Structure formats: structure tokens, C-alpha cells
Image (spheres, grey):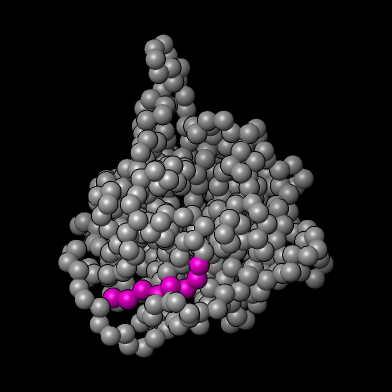
Amino acid sequence: MWLIVAIAVLVVAAVAVAAYFLFIRDSGDKTVAKPTPTPTLVSSPGATTTATAGPSPSASPSGTPVLAFVSGRKSDGISLANTDGTVAQLVPSTGSAITSPEWSPGGRYLAYIQGPYETAQLYVYDATTQRSAPFSFGGSPPAAVESFAWTGPAQLVAAGFTQRPRRFTENAVLWSCNVFLGTATTLKDSSGAVVTGRDISAAAGKLVFDVYTDRYREGPYSVQVTANLRLLDLQSGMVQTIASHSELEGYEFDYQEPLLSPDGSAVMFSSTGTDVSVTYEILGTDGSVIMAPKHLLFPSRYSWNPARPTQIAFAGRRQENGPTFIFRYDTASGGGPKVIANISGQILMDIAWSPDGKTVAYTLLDHQYNLDTGDLMAFSPGQLESARLAAPALYVTWGVSSYAAGGGTGTSPPPPLAPSASQTP
């Protein structure tokens, strides 16, 4: 939903500003000058050098970080970005927009959502076959897929609508899926009831999701919506409500895109209104407030640090025509979010922390706000330089893979995602 809001305003809002990058220290917003870059990691035509350290994001048999991003002028393909400035195509452009790519634990699979919102489907790329195919849901796919979250090397939970969604507050059915076997069953809680929700995230054997309930009443605003943030224990099936809030439909949307910390102790979410405003907040899974609401403009996605699970990165503007700040918040130390980057003239759309915690990758819209010419950038917190890795790019995801990666030709229909007698997930 944040992307829909952001796009609507970007079309009419911004003034083109020359794009340049100034990175600043954690202690505040004071801008510092760029030093002469020392060891260069990335060098490609038109790219800026960076002193970022860390392993190559190319997949290899030894199991190294892999950085994938949504590519193509229509954001309809997926590619790998290498630290030598090269790009390898994983999923050829198809003409249908792709969102929310995410690697499975172990890196064999890359799942993503593709297609128009009302009919979007879940697709899975298999690194062993280098092919991508729509997930079959055991032969009965939902009308549209809203979101998904990996829960194991070949297991994920997907939120799928039984009918085409017509309202933002409609709930989807949650499905427990095995992409290796191609099977799917409805997810049920400890009472045997089917679990419903919209945006989902999983970690440490837990699933967090938002779910809406409606109450109709007389008056000009006939629907009052209650937004609930809930936590499901995947082993026991027990469900608890972390937070709840009621509002008139069409005003504030709460608990969007909840993201569970790697250790399962905290969840970050955003709340957006009818304009470009966004509020970020972090709650403990017991409902306690960890990070007080942070009000910004132009919402983006956010990312926990896999190497330090108490740290999260997110972004936004303090003023409509001001710079975009990348913030880091540490749930262990508390205090306020610290600025780790300052971006002038561009809008940050997506952000992802590398598995080793040394590099933050993010995507930007250019200074003319064209969705089809976004840049994939990367920097190391504490360094003053950023590198342009590829373009165009819109969404980005890090993973760790032990499988050789490459791009299929896309010239023949992909095989079904089903095992042979000799295969293992």
C-alpha cells in the first residue's frame, strides 16, 4: 500500500533536483565532506566508487551473499548485482510488474509476486534449474496473492484472496506452502480456525500479520475499521493480539508491512494516511513500545540487520523538498533513531541489509521521479561513499546461497516446481 500512496503523490509532487549523495556520521545530521575514496569495491561505467567491504554478492558453491533486484524498464524482471559492476539476469522481463522478491533460507529459491494487484500471483525461481514458475497451491491458486514470508528452506506462508480484492481492509486466507512439493494447505490456529490477514512476516518460528475487522454504522462514514497486529506461534498455533486500533475507513491505515526481527522479539510496522506522511513504530511482541512513533514523509520499506538482529534501517524525509535520510535504530540501546545517510534529490523506495551486516543496499527513484529508471545503490554504515551497482531497479533483496546462480533463457515453458526421486529441498 505504501508504494501506491507514494506513486500517486510523486506523479504530482516533486521538483527535479540535481541528485548527489552526502553521507553523514551517526551522531547527527551534520553533513561532512567526501574524502578521497580508498580501496574501491565497485567500478562500472557511470558508477560512483565506494569503500564498502564484504564478500561478493554473486552466488557460489561455497554459499555467499547474493543481491537480487527487480529490474527492467517496467520492473518486470529480476537480476543479480555483482560487486564487479556486472549484472546477471535471473528472471527475464515478461511485461508484468514484479514486487517483493525474497530469498529462501539457504538460497535455493527466490519467491516474488507478479501481476496486477487484483490478480497478482506468487512465483518461485529455483536456482538449481534456473527457471521460474507460478506456484500452483496444489492446483487451486487463490484469486490474488497479497504477501508471503519464508518459514523454512522450502516452506513459506502466503496470504491469498479467495476472490479479487476490492477494498484495502479485506483479509486474505493464509496458506502454508511447500514450494519443493508444490503443496499448500490453509493455515489454522490452535482452535482449528483458518487464519486470515494481509501483510505477513516470519522469524524464529513465529508469524506476525495485520488483520482487519469491519463494523458498519449510520452516518457519512459507514464503515469503522479495527486494525489488529497479531502474532502466531507456528508450532503451537496460539495467536495473540499485539496491538489494536479503530478508525474510519479511508483515513489512517495501521500496522502495514509488519516486519518481525530475526530473533522474533520485536516488530516494526508503518502507518500511512491519505498523503505522503508515514509513521514508523517498533513494538515488542508482548505489546510494549520499543521505538516511539517516528513521523516522516515518503514511505519506504525497511530491513533488520541479520548480523545484529537488534538493528533496523528505514528511511524518509523530514520535509517534502528536503533530503531523504536513512536511519538506523537499535532496540538494545534505545534512544532515538540515528541518521546514517543523507540523500539529496531522490526518493528511496526499498532497502536491504546484507547477511554479514556490512552493507546496506537500497533503490532510488531518479530526480525526475521516473519509476522505470531507479538506481540500485550500496554503502557501508560508517563510510562516506555510496556506489551505484545497477539501473533500473525498484525492489532489492539479500540472501545467502550455496547454489550456482544464473539466468534461464526464458525461451521455453519452465518445468513445474516438483521434486524428482533424486532431489532434496
Q: Please check the rendered image and state whether residue 233 is part of the magenta-colored stretch, yes or no.
A: no
Residue 206 on image: x %, y %: 49, 51
For the record, the magenta segment spans 384-391
174 on left or right of 410: left
Q: What's the residue at 27%, 70% (across, down)?
A: 23
Residue 13 visible? The answer is yes
Residue 263 on image: x %, y %: 41, 59
Q: What's the residue at 60%, 80% (across, down)?
A: 60
Would you place residue 88 above or below residue 167 in this image? below
Quadrant in which residue 229 is drawn: top left
Residue 107 on image: x %, y %: 59, 68
Residue nearest the observer in this picture, 11 or 87: 11
Residue 157 visible? The answer is no
Would you place residue 56 above or below residue 414 in this image? below
Q: What's the residue at 49%, 54% (across, down)?
A: 371
Residue nearest the observer in this picture, 193 or 19: 19
Residue farthest along the top direction in this orientation: 218
90 on left or right of 335: right
Q: Please check the rendered image and state whether residue 386 is part of the magenta-colored stretch, yes or no.
A: yes
Would you place residue 247 above or below residue 243 in this image? above
Q: What is the quadrant of the C terminus in the image?
A: bottom right
Quadrant in which residue 17 is drawn: bottom left
